[in-house]
């Protein structure tokens, strides 16, 4: 099982900074609770299942499983990130 690394978290935080986008705004635009997004980005939540997992996939931190083929593919990065 692959864990989300601190370097990957920092990369996502840098993307927010470089785009001038807030985490809260991204969370609202993608229908996620901003507290959960902050918990994933800080590493407090390991995003192993549930909404936190979906957040990590949407942020590009975890691969998305393509159920049809049984193969793992990188999650599509949202247009707003």
Image: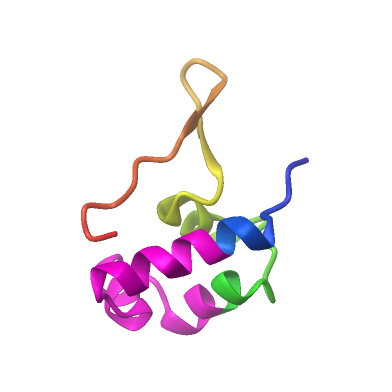
Q: Which residue is more in the foreground, 49 or 17?
A: 17
Q: Is residue 34 magenta?
A: yes
Q: Is residue 13 left or right of residue 28?
A: right
The percent position of residue 77, horizontal first and vertical second, equals: 34, 47
For residue 38, above or below residue 31: below
- Per the rendered image, the range of residues in magenta is 10-38
The percent position of residue 78, horizontal first and vertical second, equals: 28, 52
The residue sitting at 51% across, 79% down in the picture is 38
Q: Quadrant of the C terminus?
A: bottom left
Quick check: can you spot residue 52?
A: no
| Residue with the most extreme right position | 1
Q: Is residue 78 left or right of residue 59?
A: left
Q: Quadrant of the N terminus?
A: top right
The residue sitting at 26% across, 75% down in the picture is 21
The percent position of residue 67, horizontal first and vertical second, equals: 50, 26
**Does the magenta stretch mainly form a helix, a strand or a loop?**
helix
Q: Which residue is more in the foreground, 67 or 75?
A: 75
Residue 23 figure quarter: bottom left
Residue 4 figure quarter: bottom right
């Amino acid at each position: 099982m692959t864990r989300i690394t601190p370097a990957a978290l920092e990369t996502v935080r840098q993307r927010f900074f470089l785009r001038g986008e807030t985490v809260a705004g991204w969370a609202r635009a993608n229908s996620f609770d901003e507290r959960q997004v902050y918990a994933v980005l800080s590493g407090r939540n390991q995003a192993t299942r549930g909404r936190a997992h979906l957040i990590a996939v949407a942020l590009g931190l975890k691969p998305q499983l393509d159920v049809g083929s049984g193969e793992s593919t990188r999650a599509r990065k949202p247009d707003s990130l």
